[in-house]
Amino acid sequence: MECPSKASLALTGLAVAFLALAMAFHLEIWGRYEPPPALPRVDPSFTNTSTVRTSLAELKRTGGDTSEFACNACHEVGDHARKLRLDEKGSVILPDAHSELVMRHGRSNRNDNCFNCHDEANREMLRTRDGRMLKLEESTMLCASCHGPTYRDWESGIHGRTSGFWKRDLGPIVRKDCADCHDPHAPAFPSVKTAPGPHGLHQKQEKGKFHG
Amino acid sequence: MDRRSFLRTSAVVAAGIAAIAAGLAPLRDLKNFESVEEFLQKHYKELTPEEMKQALERISREVERQYGLRPHVRDLKPMDGVEFAYALNLTRCIGCRKCVHACVAENNQSRNPEIQYIRVLKMPNGTLDMEKGDHNYATESVPEKGFFYMPVQCHQCHNPPCVKVCPVEATWQESDGITVIDYDWCIGCRYCEAACPYWARRFNFTEPSIPRDQVNPNMAYLGNRPRHQGVMEKCHFCIQRTREGKYPACLEVCPTGARKFGNVLDPNSEISQILKNKRVFVLKEEVGTLPRFFYYFDV
């Protein structure tokens, strides 16, 4: 029997190796691509553009329920009789009818005197410190009477929300009033629910690490 | 050549061809096989109006086949006398991440795996060291005491490193300042991702998936049309909105009004007012990218 040459040995070896590779590829021994596990859908509340609260002006525009603002349903116009009761620290004690109010306006809650903003004689009116009378839905101008720099920023569009068109000749810009975001009795912006964070490609959620 | 060596060589060649054929097996699973039309399409800047019309028609057909709805795809050009800039008030931002999800919904990003253009970093008060930032925070409600929140997205740099490194010129800066990507020209090398100092670019490692009912049909060629596996994408200031005069989606959804956008060439725009009156800064100023995305604090 003739001795197989080196070349033929090498060729046989290659053929075997190739066939083994073909089998391996065919049987997918390195595993198949698995689609990532399903992720929960993001709650639509995280993509809606509504404001955190609704001002009276907005309620009137959209025909909402304004019964909360019918002060004179209980109060009598011209009734000066009621005096504010103060506790030993000088803070206003809320009357029972308004106990649901949270008073947190100003540093250390010092702006808690009802009649700093509301008119004493007609509760459905607002009164600035310089004596101008404003309707309840005109509260933005009341806020402006103390918060000058913020009002200046709001006027130029820097403070507060905007939507619509940045290019005014193509469409209108929509602005929001102070009370659309701030509760006049507790103006600090409220805490809100956090939208879900990112899910890394391999679902590794290591807290505090830069790469997910 | 004798009979024996011929047979031996043939056996090796046949085995080799079998191995190659088996190795190409993954091609059997290739979905959305790119049409010849897309493959032969020219670079965005070389397309004639007629060819652009055909390309938009092809994109519409593809979207209709994949998502079952007829989109409104346009090629929106930059406006004359407009240069966009963005400003973000870090005193106002509360870290709610609504911008992240509004962006995903507007720009047809993949929902699974997730691709998000905006990353919100939770930063401890008193530092701007981004290494201390955490973007995986999962508290029930925000803001938390002792932290501020810094959303980061594409800064639309005036001197963009991502554009310089692209070997095929698939990404470039337009005259209104937006750095765009031709998704049909991108080869997926990810050089731009590596070059970006803000980690603003995202890569489609797999075929993106969007639920059919969540596709935004208002699309632009350089903007939010659906992408394929293997291409880069990033924030483009909502080109399909802003080049029609509207605000970007992240700005409209922001509950606190921390986000401001506009034309810096218009002295009365909000953005010009901010640049004039607030102490703005840019992120990583020292790398010389000259971002069009500004941050500021106020009272």
Image (cartoon, helix red, strand yellow):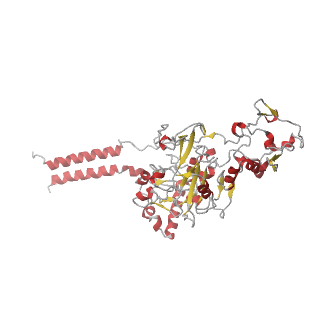
Frontmost residue, A165 versus A20: A165
Determine whether, in the image, residue A124 is placed left or right of residue A169. right
Q: In this rendering, is residue A87 above or below A41? A: above
Q: In this rendering, is residue B80 above or below A54? A: below
Q: Total marks drawn?
A: 0
Residue B264 placement: quadrant: bottom right
Q: In this rendering, is residue A142 above or below B180? A: above
Q: Position of residue B5 (x, y in %)?
A: 16, 53
Frontmost residue, A136 versus B78: A136
Residue A188 placement: quadrant: top right
Q: Position of residue A153 (x, y in %)?
A: 67, 53
Q: Position of residue A137 (x, y in %)?
A: 78, 49
Residue B239 placement: quadrant: bottom right
Frontmost residue, A206 versus B275: B275
Frontmost residue, B106 versus B98: B98
Q: Position of residue B31 (x, y in %)?
A: 45, 53
In the picture, which quadrant includes the N terminus of chain B? bottom left
Residue B43 seen: yes
Residue at 39 percent across and 52 percent down: it is B27
Residue B70 seen: no
Determine whether, in the image, residue A142 is placed left or right of residue B268. right
